[in-house]
């Protein structure tokens, strides 16, 4: 037998020579027959159509994304396996999720569905079979479930379903977990995929480099059918773009949960644009930016200060002015990027007034900080991140320049950025117009590409400032930490 003959024989055995006559045209039709309460929407019609293509071999790689709680997992991870087993009782299906208990839950639900409706489905399962691994009576087909950190070794797979490899945003943002997911695909999933074996991934989109985003970017020659159904049609017909549900731009999907257009609008306001774009629109990396979008910034075109002849700048009409500093990450005197920004607050509006961003040695950092503090004497509070060279700057200058506060962040850079992004989205953050300050374009570009930019010091400095000015404002007199008798700060403030 040639390799081609072996593949053909294996494929013939796997398909069971002749699939049983199908009583229902789609998983949705079967679901409605088994449970009259099943709700069918145009979005679920699209999912059914794609799953039918998988069943008939027209698709072997399918990705599905849709807003949360709209039935995609129930249809794909519950009804689809039952429908497939009724069609081919020898089909060996594996279901994978971010945790074993979640995958096991699908295995138990499918087992119970088959046990309850076996007389209609024409298949039966041992009711005492384990929830995570069972076969049909008299057949080799069945269900095997495993968490993303589990193994499929020794498990023949004819259909692989991956249902949400991430528990939540925190897990999706974890570089370590992303490596776990990618490693699962390359070392666990792919080795189990024989000729013609189909893979279906159902996922809430979190990042542009989550599992589905990562797989789409891989140059491995594998073509994926991507079915993304956004909550609100956001296509541009003028660019030849279409909507999977043939909606008009701006039209919301028919919700399986009964959400109205007003409900969708309320949800959009509730979750914020970042989560809305990712979770509900399935587009986690908008062209205008990721965490901070270009159109969110506001610009002022006239100086917000009076410049005196001695170089001192006096802010006009501000409730509070502060200096925020992010020092280089090197413990040596060699040059690296340092960022210092001056921010002012009027009510709930924050204004970027000045910035120093340059490659500075430790000595130069001290000099530029002194100059900036002298230029803006109204900035009573000076926030310096207490790590790397920042600690040395604090130790050198705290007895020379008043108002220095060490900041000890306890959350990641990305978490801090997300925390203040609603203020930018609400257009409460003002930047000097590029005509006044050409350096502002570098700031906005870094913010646009964060956290993937080569440098993030300007964003770190900015988020540190906004945390104090808008997120966790305190009275000025409460912000400045006086030195104790030994000249050491009495403590430091951790705003995150």
Image: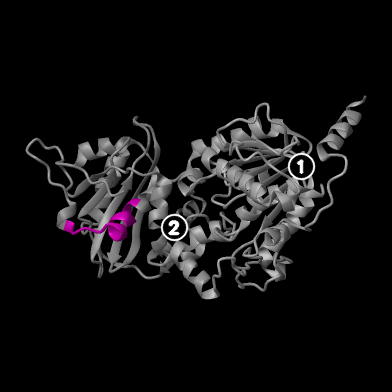
Q: Is residue 350 left or right of residue 59?
A: left
Q: Residue furthest top?
A: 1
Q: CA distance from mark 2 to mark 1?
A: 64 Å
322 or 129, nearer to the observer: 129
Measured as percent of width and height from the top left, residue 151 is found at 60, 30
Q: Which residues are magenta?
A: 464-476
Instruction: Tell me: 340 left or right of 93.
Output: left
Residue displayed at 60% across by 71% down: 252
Give the x, y percent position of residue 475: 18, 59
Q: Main secondary structure of the magenta part?
A: helix
Quadrant for residue 199, please give it. Answer: top right
The image position of residue 90, as x and y in percent, is 77, 38
Please identify the quadrant where the N terminus is shown. Answer: top right
Residue at mark 2 = 440
Q: 337 or 46, which lies in front?
A: 46
Q: Is residue 78 above or below residue 259?
A: above
Can residue 210 be seen here? The reply is no
Check contact, mark 2 vs mark 1: CB within 8 A: no
Q: Of circles 2 and 1, which is in front?
A: 1
Neighbour tally class for label 1: few under 14, some 14-19, many 20 plus, Cα within 10 Å: many
Residue at 70% x, 53% y: name it.
Answer: 226
Q: Which residue is tagged 1?
A: 89
Nearest the viewer among 446 and 396 is 446
Q: Is residue 468 magenta?
A: yes
Q: Is residue 272 above or below residue 130?
A: below
Q: Helix, strand, or loop for circle 1? A: loop
Q: Which type of secondary structure does the marked residue at label 2 adopt?
A: helix
- Tell me residue 341's x, y (percent): 33, 53
């Amino acid at each position: 037998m040639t390799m081609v003959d072996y593949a053909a024989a294996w494929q013939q055995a796997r398909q069971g020579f002749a699939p049983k006559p199908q009583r229902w045209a789609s998983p949705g039709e079967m679901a409605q027959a088994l449970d009259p309460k099943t709700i069918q929407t145009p979005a679920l019609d699209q999912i059914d159509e794609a799953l039918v293509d998988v069943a008939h071999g027209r698709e072997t790689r399918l990705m599905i994304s849709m807003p949360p709680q709209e039935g995609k997992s129930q249809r794909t991870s519950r009804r689809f396996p039952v429908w497939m087993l009724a069609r081919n009782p020898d089909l060996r299906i594996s279901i994978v999720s971010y945790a074993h208990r979640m995958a096991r839950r699908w295995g138990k639900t499918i087992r119970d569905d088959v046990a309850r409706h076996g007389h209609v489905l024409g298949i039966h399962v041992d009711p005492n079979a384990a929830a995570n691994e069972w076969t049909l009576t008299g057949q080799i087909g069945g269900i095997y479930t495993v968490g993303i950190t589990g193994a499929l070794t020794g498990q023949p797979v004819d259909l692989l379903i991956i249902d949400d490899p991430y528990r939540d945003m925190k897990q999706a943002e974890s570089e370590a977990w992303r490596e776990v997911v990618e490693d699962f695909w390359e070392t666990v999933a792919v080795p189990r995929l024989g000729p013609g074996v189909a893979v279906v991934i159902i996922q809430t989109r979190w990042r542009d480099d989550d599992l589905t985003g990562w797989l789409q970017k891989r140059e491995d020659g594998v073509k994926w059918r991507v079915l993304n159904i956004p909550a609100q049609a956001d296509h541009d017909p003028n660019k030849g773009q279409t909507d999977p549900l043939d909606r008009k731009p701006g039209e919301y999907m028919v919700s399986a949960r009964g959400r109205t257009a007003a409900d969708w609008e309320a949800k959009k306001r509730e979750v914020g644009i970042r989560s809305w774009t990712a979770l509900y629109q399935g587009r986690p990396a908008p062209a205008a930016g990721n965490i901070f979008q270009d159109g969110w910034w506001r610009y002022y075109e006239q100086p917000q200060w009076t410049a005196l002849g001695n170089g001192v700048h006096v802010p006009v009409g501000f409730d509070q002015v502060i200096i925020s500093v992010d020092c280089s990450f090197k413990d040596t005197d060699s040059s690296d990027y340092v960022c210092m920004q001056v921010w002012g607050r009027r009510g709930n509006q924050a204004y970027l007034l000045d910035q120093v961003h340059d490659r500075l040695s430790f000595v130069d950092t001290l000099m530029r900080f002194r100059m900036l503090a002298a230029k803006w004497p109204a900035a009573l509070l000076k926030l310096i991140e207490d790590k790397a060279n920042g600690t040395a700057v604090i130790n050198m200058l705290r007895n020379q320049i008043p108002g220095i506060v060490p900041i000890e962040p306890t959350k990641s850079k990305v978490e801090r950025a997300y925390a203040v992004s609603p203020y930018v989205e609400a257009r409460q953050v003002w930047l000097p117009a590029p005509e006044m300050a050409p350096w502002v374009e570098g700031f906005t570009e870094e913010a646009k590409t964060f956290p993937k930019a080569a440098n993030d010091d300007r964003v770190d400095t900015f988020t540190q400032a906004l945390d104090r000015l808008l997120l966790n404002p305190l009275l000025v007199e409460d912000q400045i930490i006086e030195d104790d008798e030994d000249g050491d700060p009495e403590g430091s403030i951790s705003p995150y």
